[in-house]
Amino acid sequence: RRPELPSSQPLRKVLQAEDLTEQQKKSIAQHLEEAVEKAIEKELLGLDIVHLLLQAFCEVATDSQLTQLAEQCMDGAAYLLSSKAGAEALSRLLGIANAKQRKALCRDLKGKFAALAKNAVDYVVMIRLATTVDDTVMLSKSMVAEWLQDIEDLCFDKYGHKVLAWLLQPDDQRLFSPYERKCVALPSPTSLKAPEARRQELVRMLKPAIRGVFLQKPLEAAGDNSAKDLLTAYLAADWDEELIAVILTAAEQEAKKDDLGLLNNGTVTTTMLILLKLEPEQGPKLAQPLWESCLKPHAVLAAASRCAFLMLAMLKSGSMKESIVATLREHKSRIEKAANEAEASGSKVNGARQLLAAA
């Protein structure tokens, strides 16, 4: 007999305990399978405790066991979306479910796809659906159609933007956590369509709507902690000339405000720094017009603000360095004064100090 029960550990961790023999692990897995089967027979898929059993069993089950489990429980799979453990179990089952079972699940979720994409637990399952279902025509009439009706909210949502961003820049380490990437990358042997073909078919339907949101609210998106990641994912996938022009026009208008408006927003600055790195050698330019039209005319104010970090990034460009340094030298005394005043009021002026050192 073991000296103490592992009640302080999640069930899934018990199966990974180093002091368990292979036979003990096999026995626990067998008991789990029996418990799961009984729970399904008694129609208990709505209970969180059953979700924990499913989560643990799915992690150790063989493909044949998962296939059998899918046959038993996919009819009630929608109930699993009420907990994180259930959602993780469903993510695994989606990889082994057949086309008919996936289609039935989508039918059960009708009217709920937008809410699920914005749910802290279920958004990963939505990504998993988008990466495992072969019938993109069916998805376009159900899941994607509902997303399009709520596209602006999804773009600005903490979780919804991740669903859209995955389709634009799948498995991007900068955008997605190791947990998210692991969940989406679970095996999917019953998905037959080429992953890139599936993705492109879905992107073709979603991209114009996402683009429309950003054309209407370019700097609002750049200043939002969620939408900025989707915006950078969009432009990493397609350096869109019209969208770049709209961003520059909006930035020019903000630069005319006494405090530089949204250009002096920390999140906007971070987004712009990412976009400056994304700017391709060929194609529409961002850095040069951003300097010429937005920052140079307001050099003193910009240098003493968060925009200083944009100017520091631009200094690394050989084609712009001469113009920026000349402007800094021309206004050096005024920039020093502005920096001192900002510092005296409690603001950090590290960027301004670095610019002055470079002048």
Image: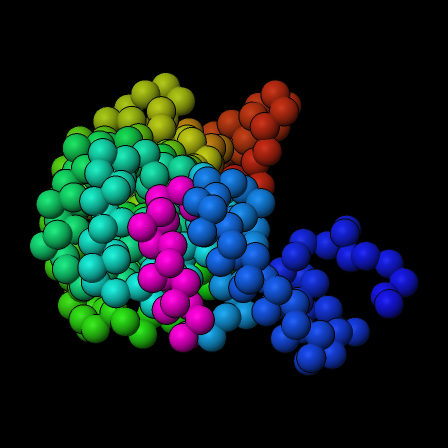
The reply, left or right, for residue 84 in relation to residue 261 is right
Residue 6 position, x and y percent, is 78, 57
Q: Is residue 121 visible?
A: no
Q: Report if residue 65 lies within the magenta region.
A: yes
Q: Name which residue lies at 49% across and 58% down.
A: 37
Q: Name which residue lies at 59% across and 28% down.
A: 347
Residue 339 position, x and y percent, is 55, 31
Q: Quadrant of residue 293?
A: top left
Q: Nearer the viewer, residue 196 or 283?
A: 196
Give the magenta-colored segment's residue range. Answer: 63-80
Q: Nearer the viewer, residue 157 or 346?
A: 157
Is 216 above or below relative to 86?
Answer: above
Is 75 above or below relative to 257?
Answer: below
The reply, left or right, for residue 343 in relation to residue 110 is right
Q: Is residue 9 visible?
A: yes
Q: Residue furthest bottom?
A: 22
The reply, left or right, for residue 104 in relation to residue 276 is left
Q: Name which residue lies at 67% across and 54% down.
A: 10
